[in-house]
Image: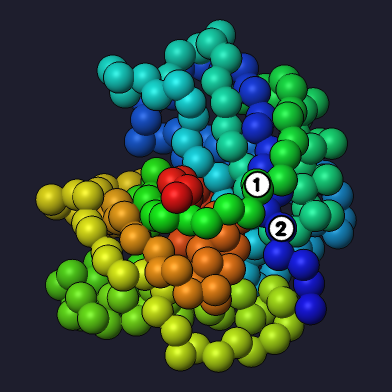
Amino acid sequence: MKENKVYEIRLKIFLLRDIPVIKIMGKEVEFIDSAMAKDSKWLEYHEKNCLKNYCMGGLYPIEKDGIYKKEKIYTIIIRTVDVELAKYFSKELRNHYTESIKGLTVENRILPKKFIGEIYTLTPLIIKTDKGYWRDQISINEFERLLVENLIKKYNQYTGEKIDEDFQLYTGLTFMNRKPVKVEYKGIHLLGDKVNLKISDDTRAQELAYFLLGTGIGTMNTRGYGYCNYRWL
């Protein structure tokens, strides 16, 4: 069984042009995807239809006026459970650039394993249904089932084991948005949610909660969605 470690890459970047907040995730994705395309192994990984085991947040500090500024330095945090991918990102992203973003410096760390009290999304969580946004299609119970199933699927695929699914991941789920959060992907708009999960003290729940910090929650994590932060107890 693979060891469960979450690798965090803090990448300082320099913006080469102004970018509105609705476009920022697309520009980050373009930056990371094009770095993966420089190596045949990681290009194949990127293009393969499989779970990718990494996620990233938006730019920090946040711009209150919704425009990220040309010639200003920001930080992107990328997390992964794949040590080889962490090494590749650390090596390549610091010198990589696109027409919008130039990489500067990288700091690496392994997230410590402590008791997790809660996890909350910093970028919208996307749960797909056949007909679009889930609230119009399925119940809250079905939404929660899909959320947990998606996480277990990622964990099983990565570790190569099939875990016992008879456990409680969280004791409470709170939606932090009153209306759906609109996000842009490939020129179309999707709807997502911001959530807070009170994590159960069950050993398996704690293991999976730590794991999802490296993979994101829900779907489209490598497109910048479902990236989470945490509070320890």
Amino acid type for the residue under numbered disc 2: Lys
Q: Residue at x 47, y 48 (%)?
A: 232
Q: Residue at x 54, y 74 (%)?
A: 203
Q: Which residue is mark 1?
A: 111
- Could you tell me how many numbered marks the image carries? 2
Q: Look at the image and tell me whether residue 80 can be seen.
A: no
Q: Quadrant of the N terminus?
A: bottom right
Q: How is the image coloured?
A: rainbow
Please say if the residues under marks 2 and 1 sit with CB atoms less than 8 Å apart. yes
Residue 47 left/right relative to 87:
left
Q: Position of residue 150 (x, y in %)?
A: 47, 76
Percent x, y of residue 206: 52, 67
Judged left or right of residue 134, residue 229 is right
Residue 31 sits above or below residue 100 on the image: below
Q: Secondary structure at mark 2?
A: loop
Gap in angstroms between the C-alphas marked 2 and 1:
7 Å
Looking at the rendered structure, the kind of residue marked 1 is Leu
Task: Identify which residue, 162 or 20, lies in the foreground.
Answer: 162
Residue 5 shows which numbered tag?
Answer: 2
Q: Between residues 160 and 223, which one lies in front from this camera angle? A: 160
Q: Position of residue 157 (x, y in %)?
A: 66, 79
